[in-house]
Amino acid sequence: MKKILNSSQPFWIMAHRGVKGANIIENTIEASQLALRSGADIIEVDVTKTKDGIYYLFHDGEEQKLFHTDQSFESLTDKEVQELTVYNGLDKPSGKKLNTLESFLQWLPKGVVVNLDRSWMYWQDGQFFELLIQSGKADQILLKSPVKESYLHALQQSPYTFNYLPILFSQKEWDTVQSFDTVNAVGVELIVKEESSELLEEQWLTKVKEDYDIILANSEDLDETANLFMGLNDQKALFEGDHVWQQMLDLGITVIQTDWPYFLNEFRQRLDK
């Protein structure tokens, strides 16, 4: 049985790329500070590497939005990244720079859990794991990935036993994770398109919940076609009411990832009354 979160809350809040907007840039220390002030329990950030091997907080594919360039982040050197103009939520020059993963981990407060997303392509790079270990915050780090045996093998070979969260589309994928007995799974992220999904099968989900803290659903509304959890999302919860997030909880979810942690925390506080 693996428990890593404070059990005093009815559920936990994960802030997707922190709290961003206006001149606060996503995937930064500033955005993470605001996430914690908004009530988030877990900060989610994305990781990418420069051409010369420096790790940054950045979601690959967002180069045009944040830098107005078509160059891929991984084709740029550290010096070139530092020279980039970073555009804000108003599409204006922000005057800000991206944070390296090293500086972020130096800042990360003791006891705060961070989900390093999109890092799985670097798990065969010994320098990546060494950076996490040398930070002294390895026990606060949650690594996540789609279920692929190559990723699981890389985790098995890591010099530290990291907390791991698989992204599941099927029960079979969970069986695959369980077959790697030295991989330290601490729960599951469920991608559920409809209520008939086998991942919501009561007996299976109850067994997972007996042994693990984290049953995560994504509430963020990424675009007009995105459906990460049965069509239940932030947009609906904010404008149609609490019953949207409540439905997630009723289905067994213990962690909700959101772009609006302040409002989700307000909902959580109402549950306590």
Image: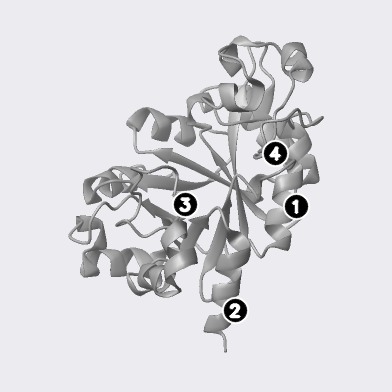
Q: Which kind of residue does numbered mark 4 sit on?
A: Ile
Q: Residue at x 44, y 56 (%)?
A: 219
- Look at mark 3 in the image and give the residue it sits on: 220
* Viewer-side residue, 45 vs 168: 45
Circle 2: residue type: Gln
**Quarter location, residue 59:** top right
- 85 w.r.t. 90: above or below: above
Q: Residues within 10 Å of mark 2 (few under 14, many from 20)?
A: few
SS of the residue under disc 4: loop
Identified by mark 1, the residue type is Gln
Q: Name the residue tied to disc 2.
A: 269
CA distance for labels 1 and 2: 20 Å
Above/below status of 119 relative to 228: above
On residue 33, the disc is 1
- Whole-angstrom CA distance, mark 3 to mark 2, is 20 Å
Q: Position of residue 134 (x, y in %)?
A: 74, 35
Tell me the CA gap for discs 4 and 1.
12 Å
Q: CA distance from mark 1 to mark 3?
A: 19 Å
Q: Position of residue 200 (x, y in %)?
A: 25, 62
Q: Pointer 4: what residue?
A: 25
Q: Position of residue 139 (x, y in %)?
A: 64, 50
Tell me which label, 1 or 2, sits earlier in the chain.
Answer: 1
What is the crowding at mark 4: few (fewer than 14 residues within 10 Å), some, or many (at least 20)? Answer: many
Earlier in the chain: of badge 4 and badge 1, it is 4
Residue 8 visible: no
Determine the secondary structure under disc 3: loop
Task: Give the structural element (helix, strand or loop) at label 2.
Answer: helix
